Image (tube, rainbow, N blue to C red):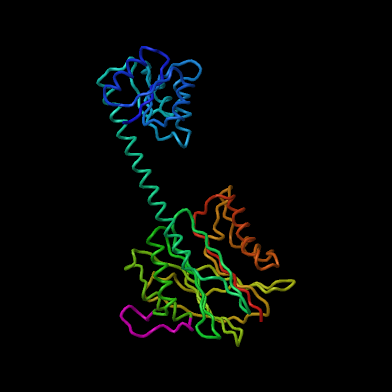
Amino acid sequence: MPQILVIDDDPTIRMTLARFLKSQGYDVTVAKDGEEGLAKARELHPALIICDWMMPIIDGLEVCRQVKSSVELSNIYLILLTARDDEKDLVRGLEMGADDFLSKPPRINELRARVRAGLRLYYATQEIQKQKQLIEQELFQASQYVRSLLPTPIEGEIAIQSSFLPSTQLGGDIFDYFWLDSEHLALYLLDVSGHGVGSALLSVSVLNLMRTRSLRRSTTSQNTTNFYSPSEVLRDLNNTFQMSVHNEMYFTIWYGVYDKQTHKLVYASGGHPPAVLISNQEFPKIKLLKTAGLPIGMMSDANYKEQTCEIDTSSRLYLFSDGVYEISQEDSSIWGFNALIDTFIRIPSDRRSRIDYILACVKEASNNRPFEDDLSLLEVEFHI
């Protein structure tokens, strides 16, 4: 049975309301003042409260305020019982959290109708909350699935470590690295537009095509992609993932191939933030690796060019999504790309603590608020 709490300092009103509500099949509890009423509300978590406005110790307005400011009690439907009918008083009651009003003394038919309406809204809100929790659980499971697909760290002459922190919503960041042969390492990071299941599904689709090397020049072509050529990879991705057939979603990407023998990195990007190459010297040299190119899927005839960079002895390469640096500050400014590069430069010498250090700086910049966008970061260290 729905549980109703009646709070009133008038014993006659308390008895009248309790007797009538019980006759309607409700489980009714009474309290003689606001202090006792709040204690019982916290203990019982009723579906609906009928509370008198004018009471000693704690009045009805304060009961409203405390109930609605409590996370555990805020969904309770609260009817304020009052003889006041001035517009200013009613507005004040609504501002303090009252959901409805009943004139005092209450008319039985009106009481019956308002209680029924209030309970309908209460249970509708409960159902919405339940569905919201189910959706959040499914999104969490989906984010865990995406995380399970990400590559594990590698050690050796080329050492790679990474971090993936999804935002409060499921997003479309993903990255991967794999050996094309014993001498050539391919690596990329992409960021699908928007949030939600659709973005995540698109990113996983790209990951599967790239990991299995089943990408082709187009959806109708039998010619497979040359994964040694970054410009060709981006061209074929663009032919395959046109936003007109993928729910108007597009994605940015940085893709590169490193040759162990020549120590050269050939790369191409499509609308993505530049990769940052930093030499491990007393005065580090910084190179921003980026090529001109539209995000994947925006235009069917987009062109992509690749460039080559020689990797110096002992260097670090960083790939990341824009969520790493597009962080809102308390003064409404953005933390920014330059602040991120400064963080890369000031990084600890111990490789195992570097990713943690970067994440700590990013979290500090966000004042430890939940991230508005996915955060993906890849560090590649070359020991030549």
Residue 217: percent from the left, percent from the top?
37, 81
Foreground: 81 or 342? 81
The quarter in which the C terminus is drawn is bottom right
- The image shows residue 113 at horizontal and vertical percentages of 26, 26
Q: Position of 362 compared to 68: left or right?
A: right
Counting from the top left corner in percent of width and height, residue 9 is at: 43, 15
Residue at the limit of the structure toward the right, as seen here: 282
Secondary structure predominantly adopted by residues drawn in magenta: loop
Where 169 falls versus 296 (above or below)?
above
Q: Which residues are magenta?
A: 215-229
Residue 228 magenta: yes
Image-quadrant location for residue 52: top left
**Nearest the eye: 366 or 147:** 147
Disc tally is: 0
Q: Position of residue 213 (x, y in %)?
A: 42, 80
User: Quarter of the image containing the N terminus?
Assistant: top left
Nearest the viewer among 282 and 88 is: 282
